[in-house]
Amino acid sequence: MQKKTFVTILFSLLSIFASGQIKSEVSETVELMGILSRTAGFQEFSKDLAGQYSKDTEAWFAQYREHPTVAYYKELRDKNGIAYERVTNMAVHLEIEKGKVKLVGNRAELTGGWQNVDLDDFVKRLNKFYVDSRFHEFFEQHQNFYSDFLKQYDTNVMPYIHTDWYGKFYNGAAPAEQFRIIIGFTYGSTNNGASRQLPGQPREVFAVCGYNLNPKTGRLLFDTSLPLHEFNHSFVNPLLEKNEKAMQEVGKKLFQSSQSVMEKQHYDDWHIVINESLVRAAVIVYFYENGFNQFAMNMLNIETMQNGFPWVLDVVSALRYYATHREQYSKLNDFYPEIARFLNKYNMK
């Protein structure tokens, strides 16, 4: 009986691995960076969208607003623009071992302002905040809350997440990356993508998605598109770095034509607008290719009519052209310069 049970469990685990199915997680370092940012008054981490958890966070950490680490962290924000995805990028490059926060992975991956920071000094100061605020005690006290939500998230969102699509779509091969979805319980409506490379391990691709209650109804919000969106950033953003010259002219035109709308969403550069355009189009293509046509149509309407990306239909057309001409373009990088041609059609409309 025990042997049969073991075989059954092993088969189930192998089936999950083969299908690319993953489960959502809570990360102590993501919570640490999110709560430190909230305590320092970062607006994007200060929206009270987590109900009782927001109240618990405020009650526990309000007394540490004048902590030396918090004051130092505010200075980093002012001097180096530490915000949004830069907070998350640091969080996924931290681990906690034997009660001590340490930096892991390749330090060169910490860009966007972090390259101008003494990282060893930052981690030393972060450890002081971690110990002085009894952060681990707070984190442990909320394990049941985290666990209950993660179960609901897996039920409502994970059936629509097929990570094997990314490797096939972008590189024409099985995915080599390890995909992880982390819920940031202090993130609210903030969602970020990030990645890291640890020595001798597959590249890890993160979607860090905020815990979000509807402020009117108090009901949990589950948005399937968010982790898909954030995963895509880890594949899309490096393509622009390789093909910047091909996209520069059309990117600047798009940004100039929509600057006021983009800046309201904190997209203040043409590079961001191009990456966001491709990521949003890729989510729509993902839904179409996985048979979620209604999701695709809903997202297309939202992006073009509500989010200020009317040209995303042209990008979707480009990506679907690529998808039907894989004998000519084995990887999206091979096709990437052609996307500018599709976007120029929009600029001519």
Image: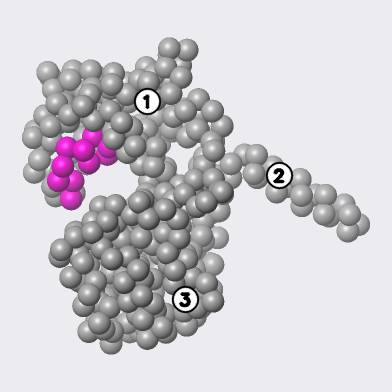
Q: Quadrant of the C terminus?
A: top left
For badge 1, the amino acid type reads: Asn
For badge 3, the amino acid type reads: Lys
Residue extending furthest toward the right? 1
Gap in Å between the C-alphas at discs 1 and 3? 41 Å
For badge 2, the amino acid type reads: Leu
Circle 1 residue: 333
Q: Earlier in the sequence, mark 1 or mark 3?
A: 3
**Residue 274 shown in magenta:** yes
Q: Which-is-in-front pick, marks 3 and 2?
A: 3
Name the side, left or right, on which 173 lies relative to 84: right
Q: Secondary structure at mark 1?
A: helix
Gap in Å between the C-alphas at discs 3 and 2? 34 Å
Q: Earlier in the sequence, mark 2 or mark 1?
A: 2
**Residue 91 shown in magenta:** no
Q: Read off the magenta span.
A: 266-278
x and y percent of residue 137 in the render? 47, 82
The kind of secondary structure the magenta stretch mainly shows is: helix
Circle 2 residue: 14
The image shows residue 224, relative to residue 139, as above or below, that is: above
Circle 3 residue: 100
Q: Which-is-in-front pick, marks 2 and 1?
A: 1
Count of numbered circles in the view: 3
